[in-house]
Amino acid sequence: MSFFKRLTLRKKKTQTSSKADRGILVFEHTSEVIKAESMLKKAGLNIRVMGPPPEIRSGCDLVIEIPLIEKLNIFRMLENAGTPPMDIVPVSSPLLQPVDLFQNKDFGKYLMIRAANMKLTVEKETRTIVNISGGGCPDVPYLASKMVGMSLNEAPRPREIGHTLCGYALDLAYEEMKRR
Amino acid sequence: MIGVVGTVPDRNFPLVTGEIRLKGDSITIQEKQIPVNRGTPALLAAAIKTAQVLEQGPPFAYLVGDVGLGQGSRRLYEYLSAHLGKCDVTTLVFHYLQPDVDWHNRVLFAVEEMESPPVLIADAGFMYAAKMSGQSCQYDLFTPDMGELAFLADEKAPHPFYTRGFILHEENRAPKLIARAYAHKNAARCLLVKGKQDYVADRQGIRATIDIPMEESMEAIGGTGDTLTGIVTALIGTGMAVVKAATIAARVNRLAGHYANPTPAMQVLEMIQHIPRALSEILKSV
């Protein structure tokens, strides 16, 4: 590839979609924003405080931009500190909602529940988690190593030990499975 | 030589590079053992088994520990940005990595610096980042499952977790989702879609549909998509055309699963043991 073509391509790439993997934390009060900003920065997270996009019509006049993939980890930190956000939305499309559809597959002795891209399979009689599949974030193999082989009641909750959106989706499947 | 970039679910696992071997239930790199269950270790184990049948050398891996906090992935991205330009792999697959658009772009710059551009494959988290970056067309192959295909087809979704409800990821909608992913430039030059039926597609449409043998349990078994990516990577590493390799890989993965007589509780290692038999059989028939 020629030098000039490469330079043009590089410029185009740095301009494209750099916000695509970012999310926004929405809070009710500015004081919560200040507290959360301090805590998240101390934890080494790549965040910044900014004005809310026009689509967001609730909350205070400031929001915090975060790496959206780490939603579960960030939410847990803020919840533990007593300042959970009102909402967490993607920067690129603040009105997008998380997947809330569950799909079930009954294998007879086993039941599989899928939430978004994550699937959790349990042996019905013993309620033992026998498999976790799907997903692409690095906490998926980690969660599987901690949960497979344990009963639903003994296994750690994905929202307690997971960190990413895939972990969040697995928690939805886990909750749905427990409800049955 | 094929290169594999991915993570290990152990926060203390250091950044290591080197040739990978398979010994029993584990892969080894730089004298470190990693159990094969799912994720990148499963991809590597399948690639090794495939390469052995094809009389190819072992894969070269770039691995780091990451449990989802992204610190390991970012260290690996930094390493790749600095070193990939001097590597001589002919096929490069990116796998379970923390999706991060900025780092994705920097890694892609490093790939462009390589003397001979490798065949580029992305799966799992790195595929999410590739789509978000708007650079999908730089890749030769993506290997999504049906949920991930719906994400590729949804031009607004930043992650499969946000795929909009009207883009339902139902099996019979795969052709429409594939067309939509290409229409929005969110697909690689070739797609290998994993599901009840596997599809090999490109911009022109579906090139192959593979649906036998059918083992319903495979969907529940963690790592069966990773093995498919490992098999197709090793086949492409021999110089085989991507569409042909994807079609053969889908057949091999299904047949290996069939030979393992799977239940939803089976672990993927059992299936990996059957890859050599399945591959030999399929190669004889093509």
Image: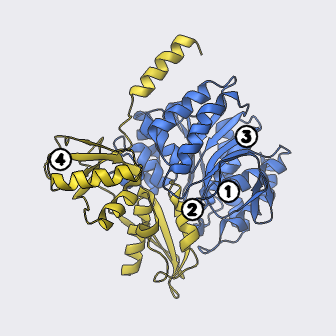
Chain colours: A yellow, B blue
Q: Across the whole image, how many numbered discs are drawn on residues? A: 4
Give amino acid for label 3. Answer: Ile
Give amino acid for label 2. Answer: Pro
Task: Kindly identify which residue carries mark 3.
Answer: B2
Q: Is residue B119 above or below residue B21?
A: above
Q: Position of residue A176 (x, y in %)?
A: 37, 74
Q: CA distance from mark 3 to mark 4?
A: 46 Å
Give the farthest residue toward the bottom. A125
Q: CA distance from mark 4 to mark 2?
A: 35 Å
Q: CA distance from mark 2 to mark 3?
A: 23 Å
Q: Mark 1 falls within which chain? A: B
In the image, are marks 4 and 2 on the same chain? yes
Q: Is residue A145 above or below residue B136?
A: below
Q: Nearer the viewer, residue B52 or A170?
A: A170
Task: Kindly identify which residue carries mark 2.
Answer: A141
User: Is the residue under label 3 in contact with that under label 1 (CB below 8 Å)?
Assistant: no
Please identify the quadrant where the C terminus of chain A is shown.
bottom left
Q: Is residue A63 left or right of residue B207?
A: left
User: Is the residue under label 2 in contact with that under label 1 (CB below 8 Å)?
Assistant: yes
Q: Position of residue A80 (x, y in %)?
A: 32, 67
Residue B104 visible somewhere in the drawing: yes
**Picture quadrant of residue B268:** bottom right
Q: CA distance from mark 1 to mark 4?
A: 42 Å
Task: Kindly identify which residue carries mark 4.
Answer: A56
Task: Kindly identify which residue carries mark 1.
Answer: B41
Q: Nearer the viewer, residue B190 or B70?
A: B70
Q: Is residue B185 left or right of residue A57?
A: right
Give the farthest residue toward the right. B55
Q: Mark 2 or mark 4, which is nearer the start of the sequence?
A: 4
